[in-house]
Amino acid sequence: MEPTRVVSGRALPLGRANVDTDQIIPSHWLKRIERTGYAPGLFEAWRKDPSFVLNDDRYRGANILIAGANFGGGSSREHAVWALQEAGFRAVIAPTIADIFKSNAIKNGLIPVELRADTVSRLLAAVEADAKTVITVDVVLRTVAAPGVKASFPLAGFLQTQLLEGLDEIALTLRHEADIAAFETKRAEWLPRVR
Amino acid sequence: MFRTLSEKVWERHVVRRAAGEPDLLYVDLHLVHEVTSPQAFEGLRLAKRPVRRPDLTLATMDHNVPTNDEPAEDISARQIEAMARNAREFGIRCYPMGDPNQGIVHVISPQLGLTQPGMTIVCGDSHTSTHGALGALAWGIGTSEIEHVLATQTIAQTKPGTMAVTVDGLLPADCAAKDVILGIIARIGTSGGTGNVIEYRGAAIRALSMEGRLTICNMSIEAGARAGMVAADDVTFSWLEGRPYAPKGAQWERALDDWRSLATDADAPFDRDVAIDASTLRPYVTWGTNPAQSVTIDGAVPDPDALPADARESAHRALRYQELAPGTAVRDIAVDAVFIGSCTNARLEDLRLASEVVRGRKVRSGLRALVVPGSMRVKADAEREGLDRIFLDAGFEWRDAGCSMCLGMNPDVLRPGERCASTSNRNFEGRQGPGGRTHLVSPTVAAATAIAGHFALPADL
Ligand code: SF4
């Protein structure tokens, strides 16, 4: 995973609440066995509407997505994160972001940014008024900045480190092999084994 | 120190704890299916890593598989083959299509007795919360986490909060477990449980069968919760005893003592507490495009402008998508299809309840009605009881096990504009096929609706 420190750029004002992962990437795209090839499926159903914001040329090249509350709920599909990243998004800003989506995002270097609803509304209004508005998300400072808006967002220290260093989490865990092996010797004998 | 059920299970699985870091938890059982795992196995291959505990890993094929005699189309077949190949290569047991143990991952594991109280269970699927019905701590993970669990049998997690949903009182006779959970979600909303493990408590939960508890825990994720749990009790124990992977003999006795000790301490505080009176619940029907957008069957489609401000925009959009007018009585909404299936409501008890309603009756002409058992064992058990005949005689299709029309990855999809009464758990836009419209209901309501052609209770027939 690539380290992520600062993302600065234009934003897509999606706005809607309860954007579930079935909307971000519909299930028939999940038949792929690769990690790539999902961008064409991003918001596939909504994109059929010519007035959908992703079809608006003014927002072409945006790398920050701004949405309403409960973004990324529903299915655990990591494909939703892959699709957003492949389409160029580096951060998602919303009042609340669903747990599994947030975790998937961090593991892939997509920054999940939760801000107060009124701050999100101000950012939406700014971007809708002027598509060229530049927003900066800073992982080091845990802040979001735009003309007239400055806010900080919550991000636990270890998650921040994961984003900043792009670590191989499996390699880190395997350093604790002795702890894992010790734990395994103490497990209850009735716990099931599949083979 | 007083602790809750979820905290007790959490604490006994901590492999490593360090300040400022998430806990490293041991995973007792890792369930795998064909859709979210291929990229994880590929990651292992690239890094030349083995699966640490193939004996604690079980794979099946459910999301993608055809449930009739047709072969899978090419691209699904490729994914199904990848699952079989990965299982072979990494030494994992896999129940493929056609196997008597195959089925929806959240149906087969409890059925085999693999899901037991006090365990940690993960799966690359958000409805892993289902397994909490037996007192396990079980939650859905993404593909990167799947790879981590395959390689290390552990997962790094921040400790979730605790939330009690206490349902007391007597559930009306025409209500099912599905109505309890739809009622809970209507009350707390789609993010009411975010960051928390919900423990379902109270007399009305205790009174439910294991199947009913599985239905409730299944939809915890629909309230945004990390997991849902019910403390193990005699219902749990008698359900588990004698199942293939349940402990036997002296181990069973030791396990029972241990499982009993896991219940929430009398004075343990929860971070959040919600109380619901079961006697106020009714059969629910969702009208919108998220599971919180529901009313009772006696109600009508709401006027979005009469809803709280933060729910209006979603409601307007939902009604446009669903093509429903405010004020329409729920019983006046006609459907094109009825789907009885999914990890929410496709266990034996669900099929029994639905079959009682359709026995000796006919599916409304022109309506497509499907029963897709949750597992091949459920299918076999149902056939032993003759339920297949009841459904077939009424005009239902009787299928093999799989996710099927729950998410429309196989050919069982709604056509654009079609309306479906579904016993599944998600009514998202396009969930059952692009342009399809889903209304979530209990198996009883689904069955009555298939006969009436519009939303109905058995008493309406
Ligand atoms: S039945 Fe539906 S909700 Fe359950 S695992 Fe399958 S696709 Fe997911």
Image (cartoon, rainbow, N blue to C red):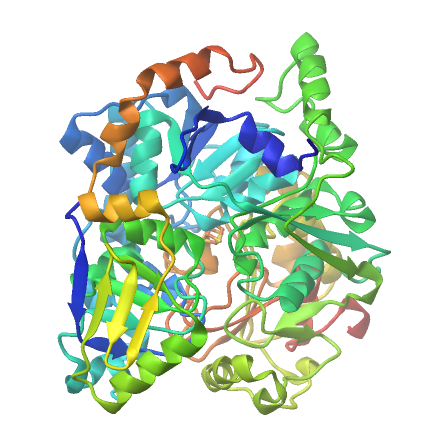
Residue shown at the point (63%, 45%) measured from the top left: B214
Which image quadrant: the C terminus of chain B? Answer: bottom right
Residue A171: x, y in percent? Answer: 23, 29
Quadrant of the rendering where the N terminus of chain B is positioned? top right
Please give left or right for residue B457 compared with residue B113 in the image. right
> How far across and how far down the image is residue B388, in percent?
62, 49
Q: Where's residue B340, x and y in %? A: 58, 58
- Foreground residue, A77 or A156? A156
The one of B55 and A13 positioned closer to us in this rendering: A13
Tag count: 0
Q: Is residue B418 above or below residue B151?
A: below
| Rendered position, B393 above or below B234 | below
* Of residues B197 and B352, the one drawn nearer to the viewer in this rendering: B197
Residue B22 is left or right of residue B381, and the answer is left
Task: Name which residue lies at 32% across and 86% down.
Answer: A125
Question: Where does residue B371 sit, x and y in percent of width and height?
Answer: 56, 55
Could you tell me if residue B188 is visible in this image?
Answer: yes
Q: Is residue A16 visible in the rendered structure shown here? A: no
Q: Quadrant of residue A150?
A: bottom left
Residue at x 30% of width, y 65% of height:
A92
Displayed quadrant of residue B305: bottom right
